[in-house]
Image (cartoon, helix red, strand yellow):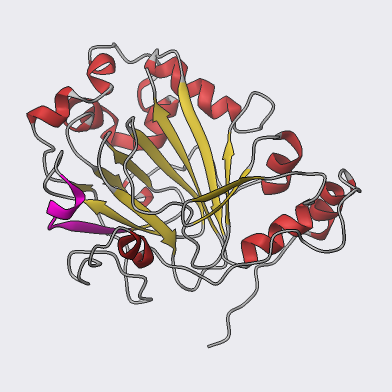
Amino acid sequence: RIRKRRPRPTQTRTSAAAAHSNCTGNSPMQPLPIQRVVLAFLALELSAPSRTDGFSCSSSSTAVASIFLGNPIGETMEQQQHEVKTVEIVVRGDGEDGILGQLFGSSRDKFFQDILGKRVAYFPRSEMERDSPVKGIKLSSLYETNDWISLRIRGSREQLDKSTMCYEQMLEYLDGGGSVVIPISPSDYLHELKMNVENELDIADTSMNVYHSGPSAVALNIHYDAYPVIVLQLSGEKEWIIQNDAFGDSIKDVNTWKNITMKEGDVLYIPKGIYHAATTKEGFNSTTHVTIGLLS
């Protein structure tokens, strides 16, 4: 099957590359063979979940058509959530007109009353009847304004050095199945989104990272985060596998996994300590999501 190559805006790429004219003609990072999330289980000496309950990169995999609520994570795990601090906070903003209303639509109040700190939840944009607060990705802009970009393939991590890898070469790395993780800083165009979330939640800080991946890419092996995360899909589609039982136990005790395919504008909430992983959906040359970690 022939895979169409991703269109690239010539003008934007030229300007980004020109800003770093010290780049050599050859990329210092050779594209690695395409990997899939199933390899994350092999790395942990586990059996990959079945097609029914687990992760699949099959092109026949479809997105959940409506809001999905995971199983309750249990009282013990609830007590470990950072959200315990924020649940009692009166959420500021303009209701559904604020940034949280744009993220969750009419489910905004339900999120804070019934979901936050209690279970995984998935909100497809098609159910919200309103536009996403951010659409698409200005990758060349982030390359130019951010000095903390890391290169990732299945958990490997290497800092991007702009003196040896220009924007064009970074795109070649992505085309080879790589990913870049970009922590949003005050100079980045997405910083306003970060500030809006913090102001409306009335919390001191969030950790906001953009994950942009090439075909069949896996930025991180299956893992859990030390804080709860809100995920917004910016472009393309991404397949996720998420723990749905044995909360707080070893990963080897998990029997049920939930498959979710996120499309542009979809929102996913994952509590602290819940195992998950993601990969670019088959048939897409790139995909982008942003994570908003609730730190305090």
Total number of numbered discs in the rendering: 0
- What's the residue at 91%, 48% (across, down)? 21
**Of 296 and 135, the residue lying toward us:** 296
Which residues, given as a range, are shown in magenta?
Answer: 250-260
Quarter of the C terminus within the rendering: top left
Where is 129 relative to 102, above or below? below
- What's the residue at 55%, 72% (across, down)? 33
For this view, does 167 lie left or right of residue 18? left
Q: Which residue ends up furthest to the left in the rendered image?
A: 75
Residue 13: percent from left, percent from top: 80, 54
Picture quadrant of residue 2? bottom right
- What's the residue at 53%, 88% (across, down)? 1
For this view, does 22 lie left or right of residue 131? right
Picture quadrant of residue 249? top left
Residue 251: percent from left, percent from top: 20, 50
Residue 212: percent from left, percent from top: 56, 51
Residue 108: percent from left, percent from top: 29, 30
**Of 54 and 165, the residue lying toward us:** 165
